[in-house]
């Protein structure tokens, strides 16, 4: 049975995604059409869009969200703002999808397929590597970073029991100290208008909390953050967590709420309240809210910051993979 590769655009991708998402059990927020389009608009200059689908007759078996620069093909996305990247493929169709895709890319004179931000369970590492090897291509793969993940228990008390004695004591002590400083209010914002209203505060605290974050938040990056918040709230995947002390916002988180998982994308806090550990406690209360809502997991995403392990997270390696096609 023959397969065909079709070039898509972001409008047609939304329909393709809708057709395919019911078939695949793996869902990555950084591969949804809204995210890909916003990233492309912000950072895609100088690259050619290579947004492909593979079809068997009329059925889409997979999506390849790719771009090309000088005969090097990579995922749409970048490791500084996209934590996990991958192909989207219907179950059991991985081998056929990758054989067809690699043949197509070779015909287009692609020299390298350069793929980053790969989880160990990515289709790249589970399937593409073996398919490419069988086709005689040279493959190089290395660990590039780590992410940290937390399986959520059924109750807050069970979560506290998961922590070691020292960290459990620290969480309770810091929460008590914050309560002594004033009235605590933690709430989530999911409405698009309300999210836009809160973004000024988030970005202000983001740039004021640390010098490296201030340097990161260039005008282009700030524009991306705002556009991303709009796009992801449109499809109801984004939530802001807000920690108030006596009605004053002192810390915030940006999370993606997707597939029974809360993904902690970024955070900010008011440095005037740093002595009260408001940045850490906002994340703690975000975890608590997730548990109370019945979420199954909390993903701290890319980076091995110490607080993630102290809050019970487990390390997951992140890889890159380069395949020489020419």
Image: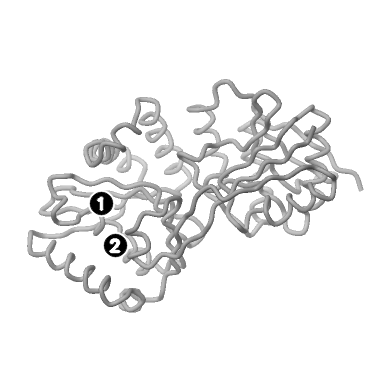
Question: Could you classify mark 1 by the number of other residues whose Cα lies within 10 Å: few (under 14), some (14-19), or many (20 or more)?
Answer: many
Nearest to the observer: residue 106 or residue 158: 106
Per the model, the C-alpha gap separating discs 2 and 1 is 12 Å
Q: Where is residue 190 in the image (x, y as percent from the top left)?
A: 36, 49
In this rendering, the answer to whether 157 lies above or below 238 is below
Nearest to the observer: residue 268 or residue 229: 268
Nearest to the observer: residue 113 or residue 22: 113
SS class of the residue under badge 2? Answer: helix
Which residue is rendered at x = 24% and y = 59% of the image? 281
Which residue is rendered at x = 25% and y = 40% of the image? 210
Which residue is rendered at x = 13% and y = 51% of the image? 247
In this rendering, the answer to whether 303 lies above or below 162 is above
User: Looking at the image, is mark 2 or mark 1 earlier in the sequence?
Assistant: 1
Question: Could you classify mark 2 by the number of other residues whose Cα lies within 10 Å: few (under 14), some (14-19), or many (20 or more)?
Answer: some
Q: Where is residue 18 in the image (x, y as percent from the top left)?
A: 64, 47
Residue for badge 2 = 284
Q: Which mark is residue 208?
A: none
User: Is any part of residue 122 visible from this angle?
Assistant: yes
Q: Position of residue 116 (x, y in %)?
A: 59, 43
In the picture, measured across the screen, residue 208 lies left or right of residue 290, that is: left
In this rendering, the answer to whether 169 lies above or below 210 is below
In the picture, measured across the screen, residue 126 lies left or right of residue 255, that is: right
Residue for badge 1 = 242
């Amino acid at each position: 049975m023959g397969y065909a590769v079709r070039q898509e655009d972001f409008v047609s991708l939304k329909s393709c995604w809708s057709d395919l998402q019911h078939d695949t059990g793996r869902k990555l927020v950084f591969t949804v059409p809204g995210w890909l389009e916003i990233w492309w608009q912000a950072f895609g200059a100088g690259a050619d869009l290579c947004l492909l689908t593979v079809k068997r007759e009329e059925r889409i078996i997979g999506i390849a969200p790719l771009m090309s620069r000088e005969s090097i093909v990579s995922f749409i996305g970048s490791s500084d703002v996209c934590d996990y990247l991958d192909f989207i493929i219907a179950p059991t169709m991985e081998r056929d999808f990758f054989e067809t895709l690699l043949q197509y890319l070779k015909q287009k004179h692609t020299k390298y397929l350069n793929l980053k931000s790969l989880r160990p369970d990515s289709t790249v590492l589970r399937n593409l590597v073996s398919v490419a090897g069988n086709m005689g291509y040279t493959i190089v793969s290395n660990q590039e970073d780590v992410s940290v993940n937390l399986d959520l228990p059924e109750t807050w008390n069970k979560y506290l029991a998961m922590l070691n004695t020292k960290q459990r004591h620290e969480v309770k002590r810091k929460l008590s100290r914050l309560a002594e400083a004033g009235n605590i209010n933690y709430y989530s914002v999911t409405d698009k208008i309300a999210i836009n209203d809160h973004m000024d505060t988030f970005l202000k605290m983001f740039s004021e909390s640390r010098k490296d974050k201030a340097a990161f938040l260039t005008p282009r990056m700030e524009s991306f953050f705002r556009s991303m918040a709009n796009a992801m709230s449109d499809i109801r995947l984004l939530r802001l967590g807000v920690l108030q002390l006596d009605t004053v916002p002192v810390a915030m988180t940006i999370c993606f709420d997707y597939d029974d998982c809360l993904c902690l994308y970024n955070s900010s806090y008011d440095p005037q309240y740093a002595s009260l550990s408001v940045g850490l406690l906002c994340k703690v209360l975000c975890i608590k809210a997730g548990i109370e809502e019945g979420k199954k997991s909390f993903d701290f995403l890319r980076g091995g910051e110490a607080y993630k392990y102290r809050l019970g997270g487990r390390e997951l390696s992140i890889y890159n993979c380069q395949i020489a096609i020419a």
